[in-house]
Amino acid sequence: MTMVFRRLLLLILAMFPMSFAWATMTPLSIERADYVIESVDGPARPPGDGVVWQPTELAQRVPNPGGELVRVWLRMPFRLDEAPPTPLAVMFPRMYSGGVVLLNDVPVGEVEGSSRTRQGHSLRPYMMMLPLQSLRQGENVLTIGVTSRYARVGIGPPVIGALAEIEAMYLDRFFWEYSVALIAVWLLVVGGLFMLVIWLRRRSEVLYAIFALGMIGWGLRSLFHVVPSTPIEMWPYWRALFYLATACGDIFVCIFLLRSGGFVAPRLERAAMLYGTVAPILMLVAGEHFLTWETWWYAGLLPLDVFALYIMARSAWRERTWVAMSLAAIVGGGILLAVGHDAAILAGLLPNSSIFIAHIVAPAVIGAMTVVPLGRFIEALSQVENMNVMLARRIAEREAELGARHEELRHMEAAQASASERQRIMQDMHDGLGSQLLSSLALVEAGGADQRQVAQALRECIDDMRLVIDALSPDDNDLLSALGSLRFRLQPRLQAAGIALEWRLDCAEDALALEPRQGLAALRIVQEGIANVLKHAGATRLVVHVSVEERAVSIRIADNGCGLIVDRVDEGRGLGNMRRRAAGIGAALNITSSGMGTEVLLALPR
């Protein structure tokens, strides 16, 4: 039992170095292969004996002159010095048209690609496990059957090695060829839409629209890297969209660089945009046969690229700022590198397994170019802020000026109002108190006035003076209070004349505030109306009725006297003064008279 345990332990220890050696083995890159082209009508398995295999370098692509759907078999022998203890993995850097993979004639995997119903165009790498039972010490054969319509068919040199090594290589390449392309799609399309929104808000800034179309074009072009295949009936439209997006991205970016450098050439821009539609139209017309000529169409875009870079470099040299020089170096170097590198792959000047970098460089280059529109945007914001500050300052100055003028106007209005008020009070005292004093003085000087008449005249003067004081008092401008004072002073005279006074107030308010000018005029009218009753009516009953409504204050004075002829009353005094006072304060005065008495109705607006 002990002997068995020792042998088992020695066997395990002996396997450790072997396993470690396989886990850290240097990946094996297969550079050469033999190929055969056959029809797709036959079974999808490698051809048998009697078929002549042609040698090829896997860094290059196998020609398919007819451009028809064919199956290309690639046979790649590789040698293992000893049988591996664990399964190995293989990474295919490029399986553009998909294919079926066999190890020593045993199927190990398949990538969907081109067929009679679909067109493959996958740019991402693929990794597969090589089963341990299919591997053997010595000679092994890895066979791939690729179905394609392209004029040149290839997969690039596959790499075989331990799972950890191959997986690390696969994830690294997958990130750069697929994940970065997906990120580029989102960044460029969303960024382009954002620029379009800015342009829609500022239609005069055409540069934003041009830059937005360039970003969206490059974003849609990068979308081609993440879609592995297309239904065959949609393939011409999909490829035409790819050419259109490529043209849109390249041409509008060049127009942006030209205009940013101060070079505006509408004819050149229209010619470039017209040339950009050539490839999409030919793809729709000629189908996959145009693929043999696409390199020449790409080459036709290069003069515009070179000229745009020249204008940008010239503008940067004139400015000679580190921002302009750095931007020119990044954009120029990035565009030349991406266009030159990817064109060299398509032309067969670089290995077929090389990574396309246009979708990697485009976000970086366009990101650097955003310095220009963002700079314009920031400059526009600064101008707006400066204009706002200037406008605020001017508004403050104008407000101060208007405030000073308003204050000056207020003083002038106050002085004018004061002068007008003095003039009105003087006129009122002249018409009332002054007139009564002059009349009394004339009677006294003529010797025609007895003591009673003089006392009556002085009493009327005092009443008139108190009336003015009550109406113009700054502490109390209540009309009802002023009317009450007037009633208190006149009631003894009415009683002495044998006139019964009926005083009625119909109002909900305890006080009725009017302007002093309105109050004085109303009191004058009431005083004049009562004075007429005392002097001329011969009445025995007098009614003073005050009512307050929503929009007016009504004062009614009615007596049962002999009446008067309104149209024949002297307009210089009496009724004429009452009408002028009412018109002066915007009140309505209605006087009616008959043999049964007289009624004066005054309506004051509230």
Image (spheres, grey):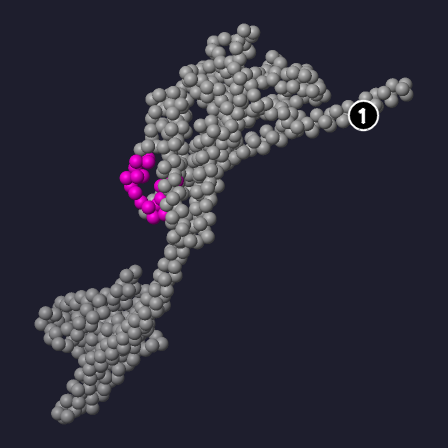
- For the N terminus, the quadrant is top right
Using a 10 Å C-alpha cutoff, classify the residue at mark 1 as few (fewer than 14 neighbours), some (14 to 19) or many (20 or more).
Answer: few
SS at badge 1: helix
As drawn, the residue found furthest toward the front would be 55
In the visual, does 124 lie left or right of 506? right
Q: Residue at x 47, y 9 (%)?
A: 41
The residue to which callout 1 is attached is 13
Q: Disc 1 marks which amino acid?
A: Leu
Near-viewer residue (116 or 573): 116
When the figure is inspected, residue 242 is found, relative to residue 69, above or below; the finding is below
Near-viewer residue (482 or 423): 423
Asked whether 142 falls inside the magenta stretch, the response is no
Q: Residue at x 75, y 24 (%)?
A: 18
When the figure is inspected, residue 395 is found, relative to residue 159, above or below; the finding is below
In the image, the segment drawn in magenta is 252-273
Q: Residue at x 48, y 19 (%)?
A: 62
Query: How many numbered circles does the render carry?
Result: 1
Res 160 quadrant in image = top right
